[in-house]
Amino acid sequence: MSSIISFPFREAVADVEYKGFLIPKGWKAMPLFRNIHHNPEFFSEPQKFNPSRFEVTPKPNTFMPFGSGVHACPGNELAKLETMIMVHHLVTKFRWELVGSECRIQYGPFPLPLNGLPTKFWRESTTYN
Ligand code: HEM
């Protein structure tokens, strides 16, 4: 539920009042995808790894790893296809193993795998690092 891109930038083109707060015209706003994706009103147990949650299409504007609106990512379908092909090959043709014993998340403040999550992938006769 974490996003590769933590937030997009937006600029208020007019004064905007939101929940009693004023965002003056010209101010920059950074909607944090993480907060939206971790809202239990939209996703039950949002911290839990549960790919099956996507068997039901999320409500509009609750899951937006590719942003939203006129500047939403135009490469999103290509990115999803490439990811699917990569995962297919990794799952069907390779074995994987974490390098080292530390498998944690670092927050800086956005979550990333600690030290880039060094991992070893190999086929039966070849090793790739
Ligand atoms: C997993 C892969 C990718 C992710 C998570 C991702 C995510 C995003 C996000 C969050 C934005 C900002 C959207 C917004 O401001 O509302 C964006 C913008 C953009 N992305 Fe991607 N993207 C990915 C792959 C790609 C690919 C493969 C391409 C092109 C082949 C691409 C091209 C662009 C472009 C041109 C924009 C700027 C759109 C604009 O400002 O109008 N992205 N992307």
Image (spheres, rainbow, N blue to C red):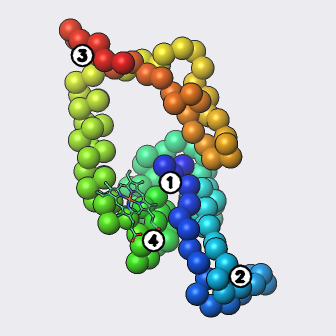
Q: Type of residue at label 4?
A: Ser
Marks 4 and 1, Cα distance to the nearest angstrom?
13 Å
Residue 51 position within the rendered picture, expressed as x and y whole percent measured from the top left = 43, 46
Cβ of mark 1 under 8 Å from ligand 1: the answer is yes
Left or right side of 44 for 93: left
Q: Type of residue at label 1?
A: Ile
Marks 4 and 3, Cα distance to the nearest angstrom?
39 Å
Cβ of mark 4 under 8 Å from ligand 1: the answer is yes
Counting residues from the start of the chain, the first of labels 2 and 4 encountered is 2
Counting residues from the start of the chain, the first of labels 4 and 3 encountered is 4
Residue 84 position within the rendered picture, expressed as x and y whole percent measured from the top left = 27, 44
Residue occupied by mark 2: 23
Q: Nearer the viewer, mark 4 or mark 1?
A: 1
Residue occupied by mark 1: 5
Q: Nearer the viewer, mark 3 or mark 2?
A: 2
Residue occupied by mark 4: 68
Q: Type of residue at label 3?
A: Arg
* Mark 2 closeness class: few <14, some 14–19, many ≥20 residues within 10 Å: some
Q: Secondary structure under badge 3? A: loop
